Amino acid sequence: MPGWLWLLLAAAGLYALHRLALWMEGRGWIYWTKSSGHSTRAGNALLEIQEMLEPSKRHVIEMKRDAKAERDDAGDKPD
């Protein structure tokens, strides 16, 4: 089979997987293009570094932490 045909089949397969993931996300089974709203550990570590480098931004970081704590206390966010 020619190389362009393999490339075309691979692109079609990736598109089909993308559409399947979008369908699964619509059903609420996975998060694909929309974020779940959870911060990552790496993001939290970077916030700590930013707090050390830019003390004037500390209030913004504290507001983000407070908002996350309120969201965690409230449970799942509504649909």
Image: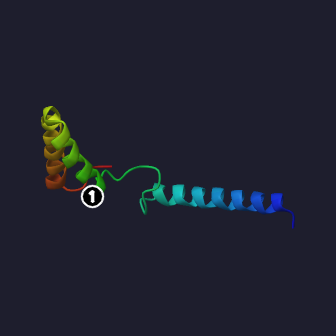
Residue 56, position as x, y percentages in the image: 14, 32
User: Mark 1 falls on what kind of element?
Assistant: helix
Q: 15 and 6: which one is in front?
A: 6
* Residue 60 x/y as whole percent: 17, 36
Amino acid bearing label 1: Arg
Is 43 rendered above or below residue 1? above
Name the quadrant containing residue 53: top left
Color style of the picture? rainbow
**Do we see residue 77 in this rendering?**
no
Query: Residue 54's quadrant in the figure?
Result: top left
Q: Report the side of 72 relative to 42 (left or right).
A: left
**Residue extending farthest right:** 1
Q: Residue at x 13, y 37 (%)?
A: 58
Residue found at the far top of this picture: 56
79 relative to 73 in the view: left or right: right
Q: Quadrant of residue 8?
A: bottom right
**In percent of the image, x 49 and y 61: which residue is there?**
24
Looking at the picture, tell me which residue is in the foreground, 17 or 51: 51
> What number of labels is visible?
1
Q: Residues within 10 Å of mark 1 (few under 14, many from 20)?
A: few
| Quarter occupied by the N terminus | bottom right
Establish if 3 lies above or below 36.
below
Q: Name the residue beneath numbered marker 1.
A: 41
What is the x, y in percent for residue 41? 27, 58
**Foreground: 16 or 8?**
8
Residue 25 seen: yes
Residue sitting nearer the eye, 52 or 35: 52
Residue 50 image offset from top left, x and y in percent: 22, 42
Q: Is residue 37 left or right of residue 14?
A: left
